[in-house]
Amino acid sequence: MMKIEQIYTGCLAHAAYYIESNGEAAIIDPLREVQPYLDRAKLDGAKIKYIFETHFHADFVSGHIDLARKTGGKIVFGPTANPKYDVTIAEDNQIFNIGAYKIKVIHTPGHTMESTTYLLIDENGKEHGIVTGDTLFIGDVGRPDLAQHVVSDLTEDKLAGYLFDSLRNKIMPLPDDLIVYPNHGAGSACGKNMSSETTDTLGNQKKTNYALRPDMTKEEFKKELLTGLGAPPAYFPANVLLNINGYESLDTVMEKAQKPLSPAEFELMANETEAIILDVRHQDDFAKGHIPRSIFIGLDGEFAPWVGALVADVQQPILLITPQGREEEALTRLSRIGFDNAVGYLKGGFEAWKKDKREVDTVEAVYAMDLKKAVVEDNAPVFDVRKEGEYLSEHIVGAEHTCLSTVTNNISQFPLDKKFYIHCQGGYRSMITSSILKSRGIHNFIDVAGGFEAIKEVGTPLTDFVCPSTL
C-alpha cells in the first residue's frame, strides 16, 4: 500500500500531503508553518526531496519557500508557473521519483492556468491516486473566478472552459479505482458545493459530482459552475501574490510579533501604529467585557477566513488580545493567510487591562425568548447576519438580511434612533457584527445569545415567528 498521509487543518478546510518511500519524502501544498512536516519526516528518518505545489493558492500562504530553505528540497510547480524565486517548472507528463514511488505531472488548467494534478504511482507501478489541488474536490470543482483578480484577461468564462477540458481530457479518462486527494473540504471558499468527506474514489466522483456528468456540454458546465458563486474574500489576491513573489520567513514574522505588552505599552502601540485591536477570546467573554473599539473574531470559530474577509489589508498592523497561552496559535493562524504585521499582544490578557482600571465596554445580550417577545409584541427590528442560503432556508418573519461579510459596507442600513436585534446561527458571527458596529460608534443594539439555533428552541408553533423558505 502506498504511503501517503493527508494532513488536514479544519479551520482552513485545507489538506496537505506527505508521501514517503525508502527514506525520501515529498510534501504537497504545505501550510505556512512547516514544523509539522519536518517532524513527520524526522519520524521516518526521511529527507524531504520535493515540495510540490498544485497551483498558486489564494486562500492561504504556502510554506513551500520556508520548507525548501530548511530542507534543501526542490520546489516544483506545474507548466506555465512563473514565480519570482528558484523552482523547478515541470513539464506535462514529467515523472519525479520518491524512493520507489513515482509522481507524474498532469497539467490541468482551469482553476488557475498553472493548476496541476499529481498522479501517484506505487512501487509496483500501479496508479494509486491523484492529488488534485483545486481542480477537483469531493462533490465539486475549483472556482474559476479567482485568477482574474490577479491577471485581468483570465476571465471566469475562459478559465471555466479550460477546466471543462482538463476534467474531460485529463481526469475523467483515469481509472475509477484511483483515490482522489483534494486540497480542500467543506467550508473552504475555493468551491461552492464541497463534501465534508476529504477523499473518495474517482469512479464514485464520476457518478456523484455534478461537474463530471458525462453528457454535460461545455456551456452547461460553465452555467452550472458559475451560478451561485459569491464574491471571493478580499485577501485572496494578496495571498496569490505572496505565493508568486515570495515572503518573509515565518520565523522572522513570529519573532517580531511575539511582543508581550503591558496595558500602557499596548495602548501606546495602538495609538502609534493605528493597529486594529483583535480580540480572539470566546464570544461570551467578549460580551462581558472588552477594550472599546476592539474587533472580535474568536479563535474557536472560522478565525482565519473571517479575518481575511473583514480586514481589507494584509499589511494592517494588528494587536492581539488572546486567552492565556494561545498567543502563538493566534499569530500562526494569522500568518497562514498573509497577515504578517502583528505588532504584539496584551500581556496577561484582558484581565490585565481590567486590573489596570482602564476603560471597558460590553455587549448587551438577550436570550431567544426575550427576542420572540420583542418581535411579536413590539415589532422590534431584527438583523440576520447569516449567509444568504441560511437566511433563505428559514428566518424570522420581517428580519432584514445583512450577511456578515457585507456589514462593513452596509453600516448605513442599521438604525441609529431605536433598539434593534442581531443574530446569526450560533452566536459567533453576530458577536463579530456587534464588535464592528461598536467600533463604528453604533451601540443601540442587542445581540441574541445562541443565535438562530436557540431561537428555534423557544417553543412551537413558530409560524408567527419563523418563516420557512418558499423557494
Image: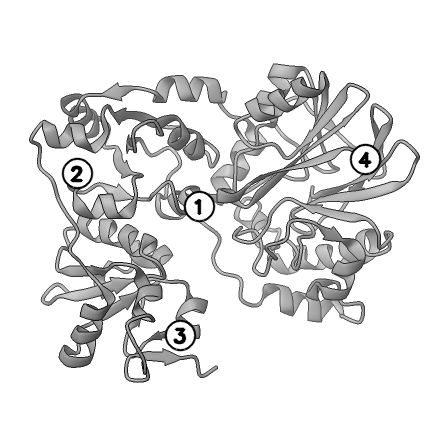
Mark linked to residue 2: 4
Relative vertical location of residue 303 with respect to residue 22 in this rendering, above or below: below
Q: In the rendering, at what x and y percent does residue 387 appear?
A: 41, 63
* Residue visible at 84% across and 30% down in the picture: 101
Which image quarter: residue 401?
bottom left
* Residue visible at 93% across and 34% down in the picture: 124
> Tag 3, which secondary structure?
strand
In this orientation, which residue lies closer to the viewer: 268 or 464?
Answer: 464
Looking at marks 2 and 4 on the same chain, the residue that comes earlier in the sequence is marked by 4
Which residue carries the number 2 mark? 291
* Circle nearer the viewer, 1 or 3: 3
As drawn, is 376 to the left or to the right of 10? Answer: left
Looking at marks 1 and 2 on the same chain, the residue that comes earlier in the sequence is marked by 2
Looking at marks 1 and 4 on the same chain, the residue that comes earlier in the sequence is marked by 4
Label 3: how many Cα within 10 Å (few below 14, some 14–19, many 20+) = some
As drawn, is 123 to the left or to the right of 154? Answer: right
Label 1: how many Cα within 10 Å (few below 14, some 14–19, many 20+) = many
Q: Are marks 2 and 4 in contact (CB under 8 Å)?
A: no
Which image quarter: residue 254?
top left
What amino acid is found at the position of numbered circle 4 in the picture?
Answer: Met
What amino acid is found at the position of numbered circle 3 in the picture?
Answer: Glu
What amino acid is found at the position of numbered circle 2 in the picture?
Answer: Ile
What whole-number distance in Å separates the C-alpha atoms at marks 3 and 4?
46 Å
Q: Are marks 1 and 3 in contact (CB under 8 Å)?
A: no
What whole-number distance in Å separates the C-alpha atoms at marks 2 and 3?
35 Å
As drawn, is 275 to the left or to the right of 308? Answer: left
What whole-number distance in Å separates the C-alpha atoms at marks 1 and 4?
33 Å
Mark linked to residue 394: 3
What amino acid is found at the position of numbered circle 1 in the picture?
Answer: Pro
Which image quarter: residue 277?
top left
Which residue carries the number 1 mark? 305
